[in-house]
């Protein structure tokens, strides 16, 4: 089922509805990293304790870096969390949408407790999720569970890109998370394409094509 709600501040209403229908463990799942030119796509799945939901959960893009980090730390203490990734090779082989879905499937599979119901950010349900699911358009602004997943995924991927930036300085991944900023473009001109670049993405494919020509 695809749900389209009008809420702008995330709440627990969707979770309450499916819990009343019999689900005990309701997971929210979201991904981050579809747009960058480098690095994996990362997804998180989060099962919140209805009695211990941190205040201020929201779409990660609406929060400051400090607030995201504070909430991520709180969630580590009070929620069940699963992380999933799809590699650059999988992105290039499958396409970014399917790779994002694969990361979501892996995140749900990594949860300590199998969920009875999954709320998926977006308008499609990953085909490998063998659970009762709802796709929730703009879910990170509607469901606190999806908002929590967006925060955890964002923090996880940003830290991963900081680590990769230490291995490959000059592209600015510690500040741009692999997106195609001017600093990243300058790095590509100076240092070329790394194994962490998505070769199926047009800007990277164009560079490789020019090198061959």
Image (spheres, grey):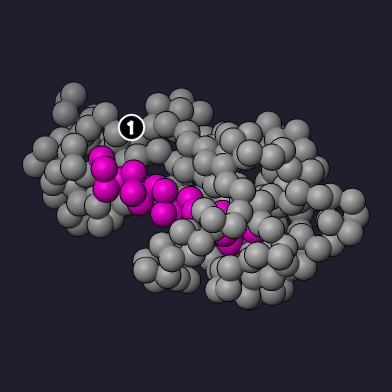
Residue 64 image-quadrant placement: bottom left
Question: Does the stretch in magenta take in 28?
Answer: no
x, y percent for residue 202: 34, 40
Q: Residue at x 47, y 59 (%)?
A: 72
In the picture, measured across the screen, residue 208 lies left or right of residue 153, that is left
Region of the chain picked out in magenta, as a range: 145-164
x, y percent for residue 149: 56, 54
Residue pointed to by mark 1? 199
In the picture, measured across the screen, residue 116 lies left or right of residue 200, that is right
Number of residue marks:
1
Q: Residue furthest right?
A: 21
In the picture, measured across the screen, residue 202 lies left or right of residue 25, that is left
Q: Main secondary structure of the magenta part?
A: helix
Q: Is residue 12 above or below residue 84?
A: below
**Residue 122 shows up from this direction:** no
Q: Quadrant of the C terminus?
A: top left
x, y percent for residue 181: 25, 56
Q: Is residue 11 above or below residue 109?
A: below
Question: Does the stretch in magenta take in 161?
Answer: yes
User: Which residue is more in the foreground, 16 or 185?
Assistant: 16
In the picture, measured across the screen, residue 198 lies left or right of residue 106, that is left
């Amino acid at each position: 089922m695809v749900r389209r709600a009008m809420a702008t501040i995330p709440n627990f209403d969707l979770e309450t509805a499916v819990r009343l229908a019999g689900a005990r463990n309701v997971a929210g799942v979201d991904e981050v990293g579809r747009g960058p030119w480098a690095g994996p796509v990362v997804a998180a799945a989060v099962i919140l304790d209805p009695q211990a939901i941190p205040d201020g959960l929201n779409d990660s893009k609406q929060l400051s870096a400090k607030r995201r980090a504070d909430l991520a730390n709180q969630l580590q203490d009070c929620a069940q969390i699963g992380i999933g990734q799809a590699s650059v090779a999988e992105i290039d082989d499958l396409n970014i949408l399917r790779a994002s879905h694969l990361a979501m499937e892996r995140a749900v599979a990594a949860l300590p407790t199998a969920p009875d119901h999954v709320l998926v950010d977006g308008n499609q349900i990953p085909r490998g999720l063998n659970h009762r699911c709802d796709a929730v358009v703009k879910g990170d602004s509607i469901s606190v569970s999806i908002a929590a997943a967006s925060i955890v995924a964002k923090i996880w991927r940003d830290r991963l890109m900081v680590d990769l930036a230490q291995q490959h300085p000059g592209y600015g991944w510690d500040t741009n998370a692999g997106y195609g900023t001017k600093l990243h473009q300058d790095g590509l001109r100076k240092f070329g394409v790394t194994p962490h670049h998505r070769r199926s993405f047009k800007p990277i494919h164009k560079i490789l094509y020019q090198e061959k020509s």
